[in-house]
């Protein structure tokens, strides 16, 4: 392929869109502009148990280190929901909500597969150049780089937001030794958050301050990344969320239905304003059923889902908390009974039995036995 670095950038972005990505752009491998904030966030423990955030920190802050001889990055976005699809019906009795990004097939598989395919064709077109793709699999500050590549701006809830498509997106990309210059039409998106504080005000656990999230308070972190018992002070605030949370995105004005003027603008990026490339699946899980799962049940249920990141014990822990929140409003006796069963089941992991004891104590307003029975009981 012949041409200059700007023409190459334009051609590479177009190739990514033809491969099915909603958005694509290029950026230089410049050091992060937020090194101080990231180091302070980690030093303050706001990353919680996510030790991977402390690994290869110099690569995160200096992305050119990701691949020897890196000259450029290409960033892509895939949609998992359309803007306007941000009001789920009330979940059925004893069901828990799951975040939208895991309702379809595992984005790691689909995004990575298409990135590999794009990189393979580019290797053929540009012999001697190297490419390394990623989607949550490399120490890269994807949102900051995606903003630099013109895919949107990083909002107050720290999500990447596109002015037409909203924020229901997953990100990926690749580093390359190929020289790519952003074309003139690829412009940075100004921050449109303005004085809005809807995400901050709506966060059930008060995890968000402007442009910063304390992971140790975030429902997504607590239900997906945290490997131990969830602190009781967050149980009620978790509400119906058994895996992840979408509250800060649901209230965001940029995820409301696209205004008619935008629909008439001719901007066709994003597969008709947000048709998901990942498919759609179940929005809730039957919690009573989940409490009866064994390892094979979990494996079968999550085989093609990103929910496999949570262990069986974590899912049962989450289910017990959401069931207790359901029971607190419904007073359903079957829920009380199932929680008691989990508390006294010596085959369940200690974390599950202790969580059952904690939530039962909250429901009954009494102190349950100080310790759940041990496996030897």
Image (cartoon, rainbow, N blue to C red):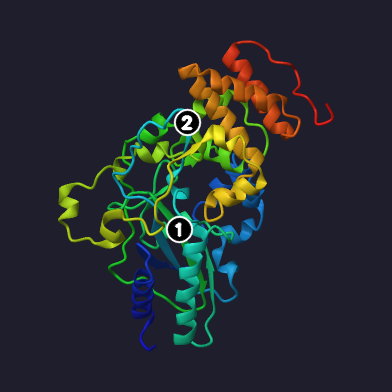
In this view, which residue lies farthest toward the right?
A: 376
Position of the C terminus by quadrant: top right
Is 150 placed left or right of 127 in the picture? Answer: left
CA separation in Å, label 1 and label 2: 26 Å
Residue 58, percent across and down? 62, 59
Query: Which comes sooner in the sequence, label 1 or label 2?
Result: 1
Q: Which residue bears the numbered disc 1?
A: 171
Q: Residue at x 49, y 24 (%)?
A: 326
Vertical arrangement, residue 210 with respect to residue 119, above or below: above
Q: Secondary structure at mark 1?
A: strand
Quadrant location of residue 229?
A: top right
Position of the N terminus by quadrant: bottom left
Q: Are marks 1 and 2 in contact (CB under 8 Å)?
A: no
Is 209 placed left or right of 57 in the picture? Answer: left
Give the label on residue 240, or none: 2
Residue 30 appears in the picture as rendered: no
Q: Residue at x 51, y 30 (%)?
A: 238
Q: Residue at x 64, y 52 (%)?
A: 52
Crowding at dot 1, Cα within 10 Å, few <14 / some 14-19 / many 20+, comes out as many
Give the label on residue 99, or none: none
């Amino acid at each position: 392929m012949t041409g200059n670095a700007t023409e190459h950038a334009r051609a590479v972005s177009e190739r990514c869109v033809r491969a099915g990505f909603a958005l694509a752009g290029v950026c230089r491998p410049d050091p992060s502009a937020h090194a101080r904030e990231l180091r302070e966030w980690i030093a303050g423990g706001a990353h919680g148990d996510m030790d991977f955030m402390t690994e290869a920190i110099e690569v995160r802050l200096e992305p050119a280190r990701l691949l020897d001889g890196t000259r450029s990055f290409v960033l892509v976005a895939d949609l998992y929901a359309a803007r306007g699809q941000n009001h789920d019906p009330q979940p059925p009795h004893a069901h828990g909500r799951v975040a939208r990004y895991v309702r379809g097939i595992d984005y790691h598989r689909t995004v990575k597969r298409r990135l590999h395919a794009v990189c393979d064709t580019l290797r053929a077109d540009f012999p001697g150049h190297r490419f390394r793709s990623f989607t949550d699999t490399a120490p890269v500050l994807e949102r900051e780089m995606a903003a630099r590549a013109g895919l949107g701006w990083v909002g107050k809830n720290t999500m990447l937001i596109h002015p037409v498509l909203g924020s229901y997106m997953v990100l990926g990309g690749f580093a390359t030794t190929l020289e790519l210059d952003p074309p003139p039409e690829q412009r940075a998106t100004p921050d449109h958050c303005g004085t809005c504080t809807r995400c901050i005000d709506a966060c059930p656990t008060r995890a968000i301050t402007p442009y910063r999230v304390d992971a140790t308070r975030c429902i997504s972190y607590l239900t997906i990344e945290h490997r131990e018992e969830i602190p009781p002070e967050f149980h009620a605030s978790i509400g119906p969320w058994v895996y992840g949370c979408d509250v800060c995105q649901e209230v965001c004005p940029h995820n409301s239905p696209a205004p008619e003027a935008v629909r008439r603008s001719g901007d066709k990026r994003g597969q008709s304003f947000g048709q998901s490339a990942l498919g759609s699946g179940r929005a809730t899980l039957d919690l009573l059923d989940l409490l009866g799962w064994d390892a094979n049940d979990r494996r079968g249920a999550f085989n093609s889902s990103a929910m496999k990141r949570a262990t069986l014990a974590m899912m049962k822990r989450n289910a017990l908390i959401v069931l207790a929140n359901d029971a607190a409003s419904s007073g359903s006796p079957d829920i009380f009974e199932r929680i008691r069963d989990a508390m006294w089941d010596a085959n369940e992991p200690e974390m599950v039995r202790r969580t059952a004891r904690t939530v039962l104590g909250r429901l009954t307003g009494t102190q349950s036995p100080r310790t759940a029975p041990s496996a030897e009981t």
